Amino acid sequence: MRMEIPKMKELEEKVFAISNEKQLFIIALEVFQFQYNYNLLYRDYCKALGKSPDTVKKITDIPFLPISFFKTHRVETTVFEEELVFKSSGTTGSVTSRHYVKDASLYEKSFSQGFKKFYGDVKDYCILGLLPSYLERGNSSLVYMVDHLIKQSGHEESGFYLNEFEKLNTTLKRLESSGQKTILIGVTYALLHFGDRFPQQLSNTIIMETGGMKGRGRELTRTELYAHLKKAFGVSQIHSEYGMTELLSQAYGIDGKMVAPPWMKILLRDETDPFSIYEPSATASGAINIIDLANLYSCSFIAAEDVGKSIPGEGFEILGRMDNSDIRGCSLMVV
């Protein structure tokens, strides 16, 4: 029986009320049925694999749509006129992903609640964004999120910095001297460059890297990167954000150990067999599948091109990119 569209507000409320993995898996099956019914592309993909709501009974039965479809197709559940279009960075001349967002408030609810679960009230922080390459190209989901966090913080010093390292340095010193809790969210290469020019001892500031080194210098291992940033900023931990154009949710981590919000789940698949998905309870390494139930109107089940490691009860780590996959601006460094 097909789900009626008017029930979607109820389903949205269920998604953001999830508090444990059992609830996540139950609602994921409900979302799968909805997207099978109202996403023609995804339904055709499922049918090609011999999958349907009649055969999908548990979380590992759900087909995960290859993320490359966002480059070649309009991935949408129901037919709608989008409020936003997010585009991936890609490389020069490459085909980029496009994520058509039906309802901007759904994304805003996802990143706002996700941030609050990990960091508390955004109003307690001054939010500084060092995202030059993302600001320059526009249509970035990361910039959209950080812009809204800046506004939600309400702090007079919150804002973006393009390549204004001296101004950023002055602002950080002023915030540190006042004891203001601050989060500096930066693309990896910009944080490295800023830290090299203005090394300092930060006591009240969280350094959060979002990935992104392609074409900006020697690739560093994650261990090298974090050691470099810790020394440059005098901090004991480096925070990170794991998100992408094709998602409406983000995971956050400290020193590489990532944790997702309750409506988001990382599963791993065998790198040599994309349809062999490891059980959620298994400690394993493999290619990453992502459940993002905030993606109600695109696809909530995505086979990504990153490789990771999961440790049930503790979170997951991103180990790098799959061989022959596109280099993406938001990818983290290889361990």
Image (cartoon, grey):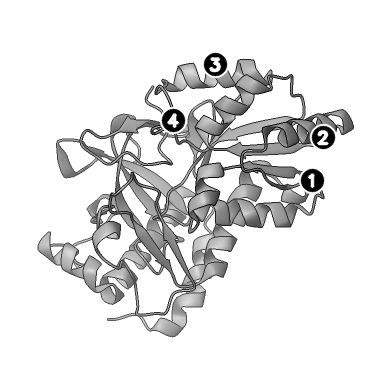
Kind of residue indicated by mark 3? Ala
- Which of the two discs, 2 and 1, labels the residue nearer the N terminus? 1
- Which of the two discs, 1 and 4, labels the residue nearer the N terminus? 1
Report helix, strand or loop for mark 3: helix
- Which of the two discs, 2 and 4, labels the residue nearer the N terminus? 2
Horizontal and vertical percent position of residue 218: 40, 21
Foreground disc of the pair 1, 3 = 1
Report helix, strand or loop for mark 1: loop
Horizontal and vertical percent position of residue 157: 79, 45
Find disc 1 in the rendering and name its residue.
157
- Which of the two discs, 3 and 2, labels the residue nearer the N terminus? 2
The residue closer to the viewer here, 74 or 121, is: 74
Verify CB contact (< 8 Å) between mark 2 and mark 1. yes
Quadrant into which the N terminus falls? bottom left
Report helix, strand or loop for mark 4: loop
Which numbered circle lies on residue 216? 4
Q: Which residue is drawn at 66% across and 37% down?
A: 184
